[in-house]
Amino acid sequence: MTSLIKVGLKFCGSCNPHIQVGQIYREIKEKALRAGLDLRFRPWDEPGCDLLLVISGCPADCAERPVHTIREVIVAGETLNRKPCSRERLAKETLTSIESKL
Amino acid sequence: MRTDLEYIDSLRRLNTVIYASGEKLDNFADHPLIRPHINAAAMTYKMAHDPEFEDLLTVKSHLTGRKINRFTHIHQGPEDLVKKVKMLRAISQQTGSCYQRCVGFDGINALYSTTYDIDQQYGSDYHRRMKNYVEHLQETDNMVVGAMTDPKGDRGLKPGQQDDPDMYVHVIEKNDEGIVIRGAKTHQTGAVNSHEILIMPTVALTEEDKNYALACAVPIDAPGVLHIFGRQVNDSRKFDQIDQGNACFGVVGGEALTILEDVFVPWERVFMCGEYDFAGTLVERFACYHRQNYGGCKGGVSDVIVGASTAIAKMNGVERASHIKDKIVEMIHLTETVYCCSIACSSQGRSTPSGAYGVDPLLANVGKLNITRFIYEICRISHDIAGGLLATLPSEKDFKHPEIGPYMEKYIKGVSGTPSEERYRILRLLENMTAGTALVESMHGAGSPQAQRVMILRQGNLAHKEKLARKMAGIESESD
């Protein structure tokens, strides 16, 4: 079991999403729980977050957020950190990316 | 920011006077004719509090620095204009109908920049009042109906030439406290479930009609204000459930004829009073903002229609037919084309002297003109895919009837594994979204097609195009 990690969460607004951002978020949360990773998802603008997770519905990734203030993991459509990632692997790979940045 | 439930509760505290089908409504917030439109407007409040959508639905106020609902914001750059379009598409995908709040949003933006320009020319005090008003809206999160369209009477005559001077809203009295106005505004989307009315002139004016050069805000339940709710095609279905198609959110926006019978307006809420030479500017700015919207909101509505068409094709067992796929492609093509126009006119937005941003007028008008055709085409294709049952389905009462219900269950069936009621529901949704009132709204909302054509010709820069041709043909040289 790792120590508590505060993850700021930001969605894009989903005007024409390629992925269901809420569904992806729930999958990530569930997988983190199962892996014993103590992630606390907080509003993106709450102070003291260890990492920012942005989940955008498509690769345009237009969600507004602070630039380069903390480490980021970016899901944008079927991409993870700007690289293609299939829908099936998205939640698992995102969790791996979060762990690698901590 | 208000929540959806706070918004609905706030309507109950108003004394809005509404008549529908010959009756005065006592509890309009729960009346079946009105409630679906209230639910749709409430979505603009609900989504602002949902982390999944807040990036589009909220923004930081340039006046106070506070987080506000975007529907009360003054656009500060092209990014704001683009976000507006994306927001409209996202909300439409949740409601499948009009949520009405864009009209007031466009009204405050048009007036914000125009009052600044009026003050620059006449040294008046309108822009300060307007800023205060916008701050008040941001603080209260009130819903505002943007009231532009006058009854107009004889369209061949100017306001002052009409037999009845009330065919356009006008000032009948001025005193130290404010003004008194009279007239009416027609097909006012969302008026009955708004908190305030923002009144604007409907045409460019000349000096002889300066009493009609009027912009002001009044509470929706101010003395002298009453609303006569408009009928829609199939609106008696609002007393059913499944037969409504979209039982929660209804169709279009719920329009009303709003009567203004000697309504007092304090000076602090008057934003134009006699400056006839700015009436045309205000109308044009409002129209461009409003035409910008349609690729967003109708784009989102069309997403639902495409989805419903895909679903019914599967239920009918024809989804693999190449002509069905081709029709779905055509619907997506048309949907994304109208969306493109709205995104384009927003990304090409420009600053006004007030600092607020407006859209590219040519692209906004091209977008709305496309809407007057493409939505009809999208709906036509959906009818083609759905089949004639769309227009011949019996009632939900028959479906649930103990004796004849089983026949409905048996004969409304499509492919195995899909309950008949699901097919019934999708057909009713398509009927609701594609037939009747929704089509006419696409044609005339934000101005009839000819209004867009006039703007397109004016913005089309024909002299430049002709010069290009003359140069290429060797008639003119580079230096001409």
Image (tube, coloured by chain):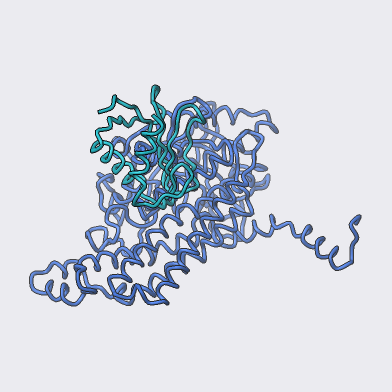
Chain colours: A cyan, B blue
- The answer to whether residue B307 shows anywhere in this view is yes
| Residue nearest the viewer, comparing B291 with B415 | B415
Please identify the quarter of the rendering in which residue B470 is found: bottom right
Number of numbered labels in the structure image: 0
Does residue A6 lie above or below B341 as drawn? above
| Residue nearest the viewer, comparing A11 with A86 | A86
Does residue B213 lie above or below B126 as drawn? below
Q: Position of residue A56 (x, y in %)?
A: 43, 44
Most extreme residue toward the left is B402
Q: Is residue A73 left or right of residue B468?
A: left
- The answer to whether residue B220 shows anywhere in this view is no
Q: Is residue B377 left or right of residue B461?
A: left
Q: Position of residue B435 (x, y in %)?
A: 38, 67
Q: Is residue B370 left or right of residue B393?
A: right
Q: Position of residue B408 (x, y in %)?
A: 17, 74
**Quarter of the rendering occupied by the N terminus of chain B:** top left
Task: Please give the name of the residue rendered at 63% of the width and 51% of the height, measured from the top-left corner.
Answer: B361
